Image (cartoon, rainbow, N blue to C red):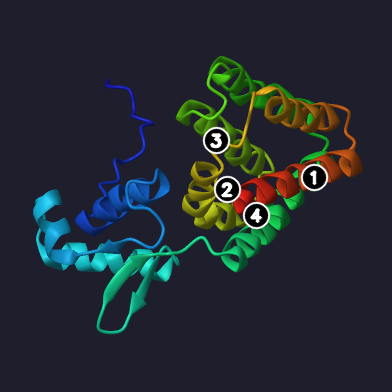
Amino acid sequence: MAARSTLPPVVQESTPALIARVLREAIADGRFPPGSQLVEQELARELNVSRGPLREAMQRLTQEGLLVGHRNRGLFVMELTEDAVRDMYLAREAVECAAVRRIVATGTGSRAAEALAVPLAEMRDAAPEPNGRAMSEADLHFHELLVELAGSPRLLNMHRTLLTQIRMSLTGMQGTYESADARLREHVEIVEALDAQDADRADALLRAHMQDGLERVLGA
């Protein structure tokens, strides 16, 4: 008798979802910098897709706040204005600090610290190029995992809506670090506070880390 499969069904993304993902990546890594215009006809040709699914994908990104429509001009990548950056960091800080307190409240600080050792190792590996893409990706991995470890689907969903904007800000702060030491130390100290089940210290360290990031983005 054949064994019953426990594999989940394969979920195939729709064409608009695939296009939206490609465009998000391009916006996040700076191929479409803030303020640049996305021209539908040119994108359809470059991506080799019809304009219907492309238009739907661009509408999704508009709803997410990544694209902004200007009447009679078209769609543009959101500008990282001071107000936009401050608001994004406000939302990000609220979600990630809530995640930290949830981790400690559930007594899983040590388990979280063990899991976060993985992105910390990635950051150490990327340290020779403190402003490189590998460091930014490791930094993002740390914060994504931090929120995931809280075990709250709603916090995770809220954080995911900010991810592309967070990546835009990480791209924007490239070039602001003379070395990886300070950046790595901030993350290590947050992990140590979680491991010690010290919610107040972890919260304070995370807020200081966010403030440093905000100042770097605005300064850049």
Going by the numbered disc 2, the residue's amino acid type is: Ala
Left-right relation of 38 to 189: left
Residue 92, disc:
4
Residue 205: name its quadrant: top right
Badge 1 crowding class, 10 Å Cα cut-off, few under 14, some 14 to 19, many 20 or more, is some
Query: Comparing marks 4 and 1, which lies closer to the viewer?
Result: 1
Query: Comparing marks 2 and 4, which lies closer to the viewer?
Result: 2
Q: Residue 108: where, in percent of width, then height?
A: 78, 33
Q: CA distance from mark 3 to mark 4?
A: 22 Å
The first of marks 3 and 2 along the sequence is 3
Tag 4, which secondary structure? helix
Q: CA distance from mark 3 to mark 1?
A: 20 Å
Image position of 75 with respect to 123: above or below: below
Q: CA distance from mark 4 to mark 1?
A: 13 Å
Tag 2, which secondary structure? loop
Residue 175, disc:
3
Find disc 1 in the rendering and name its residue: 208
Image position of 153 with respect to 40: above or below: above
